Image (tube, grey):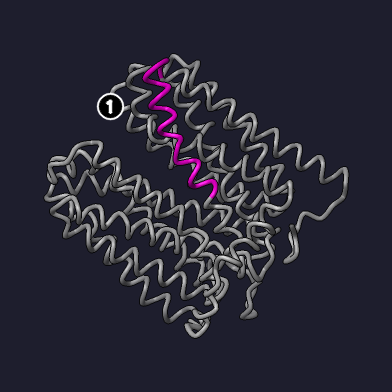
Amino acid sequence: MDRHGDGEYLIRGYSGRIFLLVAIGVLAANLGRQALPPLLPTIIDDLAISAAAAGLAFTVMRICFAILQYPSGRVADVVSRKFAVMGGLVVFLLGFVLLTQSVSYPMFMASMVLLGGGAAFFFVSERVLLSDIFVSKRGRAFGFNSAFSRIGAILAAGLAVTTIAIGPWQLAFIPVILLLVGLVIAFHFVSLEPYRVEEIRQLAGGTAHVRTTVRRVFGTAEIRLLVVAYTLIIFTWEGVLTFLPTYLQVSKGLSPWFASGGFAALFAVGIIVQPAAGAFSDRWDRRVIAGIATVTSILGLAVLLLAGSILSITAGIVLYAAGLMAFTPVLQAYLMDIFPESSKGGDLGAFKTIYEGLSSLGPTYVGVVAGVAGFGVAFGGFLVCLAVSAIILVWLYINDRRTGVNSTLTESSG
């Protein structure tokens, strides 16, 4: 809860100031990262690299993001949330600065490594920080925070198009850099938490702590099942996100303009849905809300696969996006509910390492299956993933009600 005595407010008081800075950080991070895919054809031509080489750079960024999830959570737990958040923002800043100077493939690759590392430290620590401040309004805070990330992604498309029209692709990241510089300065002065850099020495002996974390986090059947449910959801999201424009053009016969509009709709829906889902999850069981969201995404994907008109295709995309967008802030808030206060940063990091790593295979799955049997079959396979996830969430809720067992983990769990 808000340790500074002014309540849990999203728009005023200390909690409101911290929330606003975190949300702006999320927006800035996604503004810069999501500008990269629309700029990729230009980047490939400018750096004289192959599509495979460009894809490798994005894979490396994703790998860095995945493997640093747990270390970033440990830093947030042991040192301070402020140190981890500021560290992530500074590494992000360095990554975008290097992008503006990238005139060769090695420089581009190095910038992607920095972006992956910055994302790992920032996106774990900011969630833990928000969970410290917001308890009764945790779902709402997570939902609105996620909505800011969608705004950043939508603005990124416009930023990329504008940049290509006026000059070199590197110019796209200048506004992001200026925003991050202001944010780093503001967060340093607004946050009242000390950096506690002297605690860094406690990070030694990490191997033993990793084993303890793994036993605690994955030692319960509920968390193991939640990992499966979450991984299947994000696996589906990554696969559809990567190939939706291609699917709409190849399988549905839409123009590139309509296909791009469908892609943007995925993010636009989240601006409304994610805050609403977070607010609902503060009043009702979060697993129920996540289950309803997953069923909604199943209906949306089914409609999309069967659709033959622009109207029905749009309806399918909106339903699918609404379900998937509602799922993430709700289940992340639930994880913050059940992880112990003293270790929730490392616990969330360990959890995210698993699903981030496995879900990165989603685009590979679509590419392979679509090459053999078509995009319809590939996307159809995601219906199975979503159905399994929904069944897991419903079963966990029913089993918890039947047994009456408290789901909250303890330091000795596992």
**Left-right relation of 204 to 158:** right
Q: Is residue 361 left or right of residue 228?
A: left
For the point 47% across and 82% down, which residue is it? 197
Assign the N terminus to one quadrant of the image: bottom right
Q: Nearer the viewer, residue 80 or 325?
A: 80
| Numbered circles on residues, count | 1
The picture places residue 318, in percent across and down from the top left corner, at 49, 32
Residue at mark 1:
256
Q: Which residues are magenta?
A: 354-374
Position of residue 233 relative to residue 119, above or below, is above
Magenta highlight: main SS: helix
Q: Position of residue 246 (x, y in %)?
A: 34, 26
Q: Is residue 130 shown to the viewer in this render?
A: no
- Residue shown at the point (54%, 46%) measured from the top left: 355
Q: Picture quarter containing residue 313?
A: top left
Q: Position of residue 395 (x, y in %)?
A: 76, 37
Q: Residue at x 42, y 36 (%)?
A: 241
Secondary element at tag 1: helix
Which kind of residue does numbered mark 1 sit on?
Pro
User: 50 or 394: nearer the eye?
Assistant: 50
Relative to residue 370, is residue 323 depicted above or below? below
